[in-house]
Image: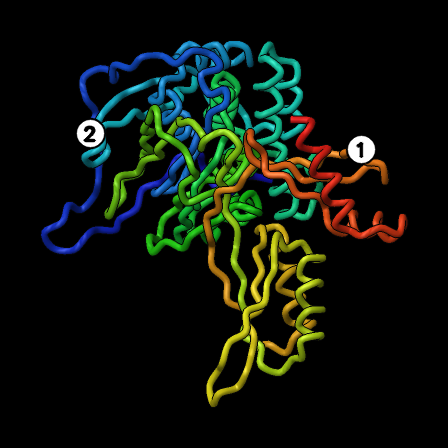
């Protein structure tokens, strides 16, 4: 079995219209870009965002992290710890990708090592002198690649033989990225990935883009259609994003502190071929940013009881929130908008509720950005027994007793529910 293609972006022959440059080439400068190194743990309590307007590959990610300020020694030490010091070395150069001054990294390999199996790569990483954080990240990437390859070829991960992604340069890319992320310690977020179309030549012949294994590595990762007939996302880049990112966002809520640019080998006709790594602080204490999908359907043939039932089923299917808004449709018909806020992993289940519980012929959806307060549920002791109270934000906290629990307690003790709520709030406030 093989990965679909090599770890770097391949050449192509597209050109801009009249008056525009035919490509955005990488023009090397003399020497490397001067940069100050980040200290180990510089990403603690910070967000690392990979912005990928031109796609992602292993070498571009590695270059962006080096340009950001991860010391060169971290990468060299990782290669040595993996036992590849005599087989591979990094060549680093700085230059202009279009108008952007960026860093490009190449892995120079001695000889022609044979393709490696997933099992042999896993064993080599586990037996290496890499630290535990680097090992776990690297194994997560290769496990995702092996699982994708196995599904494409109808076999098991243990039987997968990598060709392109089993080459030394791809192994170095993955391990060095894992070492850099372990060194920084930041929470990793990745932007939506543009997917070009067309075909690519592989060990198994001509395959459509996005290549089958790449697409499987991108399960759960937001993607965008791109008109370029070229491979913008490689399997290594897809696996790094899919296996290591904590979340995905067009742009997460953060205060930028440091930026690094990593250039690929491909010259694109309409943009510089770069990955941008942004290190920054998260929103103020007690808040965080994420993304969700807003679903909506107009319904004009349901009673209040029925649409209320549909709303409850949306919540049971995994919606973060759901609500009903009365509207007037064409010809003066009274109707409702049934809305739900949902994470991508629950999209299919929530959409199925719309079509099962209502007569709607379609569901609208769009991506939204959210800033949310941190929250936890406290078990507060009262004379009626423990009451769950939701505490959110940073001090002074917002406090809200769980109504359903308070109602059940009130009915059990034969007291007004407001008494249970008031006592729970008083007890929660006294614990501040």
On screen, residue 26 versus residue 19, left or right, reads right
Q: Nearer the viewer, mark 1 or mark 2?
A: 1
Query: Which residue, given by chain and number where applicable, does mark 2 sit on?
Result: 27
Task: Name the one closer to the observer, 285 or 251.
Answer: 285
In the image, taking residue 418 as reference, residue 250 lies left or right, namely: left
Tell me where residue 158 sits by quadrant.
top right
Q: Are marks 1 and 2 in contact (CB under 8 Å)?
A: no
Which residue is rendered at x = 71% and y = 69% of the image? Answer: 309
Residue 120 point in image, percent of width and height: 65, 24
Please provide percent x and percent y for residue 234: 45, 40
Identify the residue at image location x=54%, y=74%. 326
Q: Where does label 1 land, which residue? A: 381
Give the camera-side residue of 103 and 46.
Answer: 46
Q: Residue at x 36, y 48 (%)?
A: 230
Q: Quadrant of residue 271?
A: top left
Camera sees residue 163:
no
Residue 289 is at least partly visible in this image: yes
Tell me the residue at 46%/48% (across/down).
369
Q: Residues within 10 Å of mark 1 (few under 14, many from 20)?
A: some
Q: Is residue 325 above or below residue 320?
A: below
């Amino acid at each position: 079995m093989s990965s679909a293609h090599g770890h770097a972006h391949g050449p192509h022959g597209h050109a801009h219209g009249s008056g525009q440059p035919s490509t955005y080439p990488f023009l090397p400068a003399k020497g490397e870009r001067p940069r100050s190194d980040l200290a180990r743990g510089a990403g603690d309590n910070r967000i690392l965002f990979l912005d990928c307007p031109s796609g992602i590959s292993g070498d571009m990610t590695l270059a962006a992290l080096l340009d950001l300020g991860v010391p060169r020694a971290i990468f060299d030490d990782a290669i040595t710890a993996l036992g590849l010091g005599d087989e591979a070395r990094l060549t680093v150069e700085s230059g202009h990708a279009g108008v952007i001054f960026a860093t490009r990294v190449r892995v120079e390999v001695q000889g022609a090592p044979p393709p490696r199996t997933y099992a042999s790569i896993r064993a080599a990483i586990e037996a290496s002198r890499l630290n535990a954080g680097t090992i776990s990240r690297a194994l997560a990437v290769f496990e995702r690649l092996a699982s994708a390859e196995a599904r494409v070829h109808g076999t098991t991960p243990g039987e997968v033989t990598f060709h392109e992604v089993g080459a030394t340069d791809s192994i170095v890319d993955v391990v060095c990225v894992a070492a850099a992320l372990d060194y920084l310690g930041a929470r990793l977020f990745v932007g939506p990935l543009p997917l070009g179309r067309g075909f690519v030549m592989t060990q198994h012949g001509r395959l459509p883009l996005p290549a089958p294994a790449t697409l499987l590595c991108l399960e759960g990762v937001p993607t965008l259609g791109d008109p370029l007939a070229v491979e913008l996302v490689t399997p290594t880049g897809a696996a790094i994003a899919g296996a290591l990112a904590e979340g995905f966002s067009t742009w997460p809520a953060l205060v930028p502190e440091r930026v690094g640019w990593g250039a690929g080998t491909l010259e694109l006709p309409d943009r510089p071929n770069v990955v941008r790594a942004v290190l920054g602080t998260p929103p103020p204490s007690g808040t965080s940013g994420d993304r969700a999908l807003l679903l909506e359907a107009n319904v004009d043939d349901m009673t209040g009881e029925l649409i209320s039932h549909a709303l409850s089923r949306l919540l049971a299917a995994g919606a973060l929130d759901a609500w009903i808004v009365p509207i007037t449709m064409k010809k003066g018909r009274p109707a409702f908008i049934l809305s739900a806020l949902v994470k991508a992993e629950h999209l299919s289940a929530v959409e199925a509720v719309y079509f099962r519980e209502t007569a709607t012929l379609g569901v609208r959806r769009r991506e939204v950005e959210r800033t949310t307060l941190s929250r936890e549920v406290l078990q507060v002791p009262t004379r009626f027994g423990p009451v769950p109270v939701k505490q959110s934000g940073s001090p002074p906290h917002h406090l809200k007793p769980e109504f359903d629990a308070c109602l059940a307690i009130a009915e059990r003790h034969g007291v007004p529910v407001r008494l249970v709520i008031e006592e729970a709030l008083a007890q929660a406030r006294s614990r501040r």
